[in-house]
Image (cartoon, grey):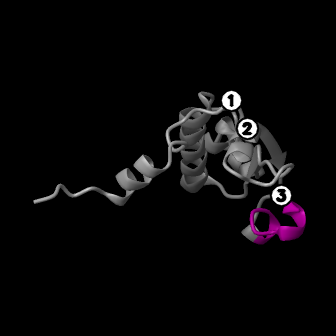
Amino acid sequence: MAPNVSSTARSAASNPNLHRRFHNVASYVSELGGPNGRVIEKVLIANNGVAAVKAIRSIRRWAYEVFGNERAISFVVMATPEDLRANAEYIRMGDIIVDVPGGSNNNNYANVTLIV
């Protein structure tokens, strides 16, 4: 009976770049066929709490695995006065903090006009 090979293992075997390290985000995009000049090096976290922390941790882990530098991608976090007073973990993890009004999410995290 043939061993059960997962689809992840098959894709790793067929893609030599899957576990390769790159010097920076631009070389990663270029070598994997992405369009020139379209490199994302900064991510906006328009959320708070556990979801924001999990997103930052996941992307930092990926950046370390791919670039050897967990800070290859920087994070802009939106912070309400309430989040700042609580010394929220996602704020401490962010690289750039943008102060936004407190209150309902329509005033801050869900306010497209404010975000853009």
Q: Are marks 1 and 2 in contact (CB under 8 Å)?
A: yes
Which amino acid, mark 3?
Pro
Which amino acid, mark 1?
His
Magenta span: 106-116
- Above or below, 105 against 24 in this view is below
- Using the rendered image of the protein, determine whether residue 77 is visible from the camera's viewpoint: no
Closer-to-camera residue (112/1): 1
Residue to which mark 1 is pinned: 23
Residue to which mark 3 is pinned: 101
Closer-to-camera residue (41/98): 41
Q: Which mark is residue 27?
A: 2
As drawn, which residue projects farthest toward the left?
Answer: 1
Provide residue 75's location: percent of width, then percent of height.
73, 43
Image quadrant of residue 108?
bottom right
- Using the rendered image of the protein, determine whether residue 23 is visible from the camera's viewpoint: yes
| Classed neighbour count for the residue bearing mark 3: other residues with Cα under 10 Å, few (<14), some (14–19), many (≥20) | some
Spatial distance from mark 1 to mark 3, Cα to Cα?
A: 38 Å
Which residue appears at 75% of the width and 63% of the height?
Answer: 109
Number of numbered discs overlaid on the protein picture? 3
Point out the frontmost of discs 1 and 3.
Answer: 1
Q: Which mark is residue 62?
A: none
Question: Viewed as shown, does residue 40 lie left or right of 53?
Answer: right
- Above or below, 44 against 72 in this view is below
Counting residues from the start of the chain, the first of labels 1 and 3 encountered is 1
Which amino acid, mark 2?
Ser
Image quadrant of residue 90?
top right
Which residue appears at 59% of the width and 45% of the height?
Answer: 59
The N terminus - image quarter = bottom left
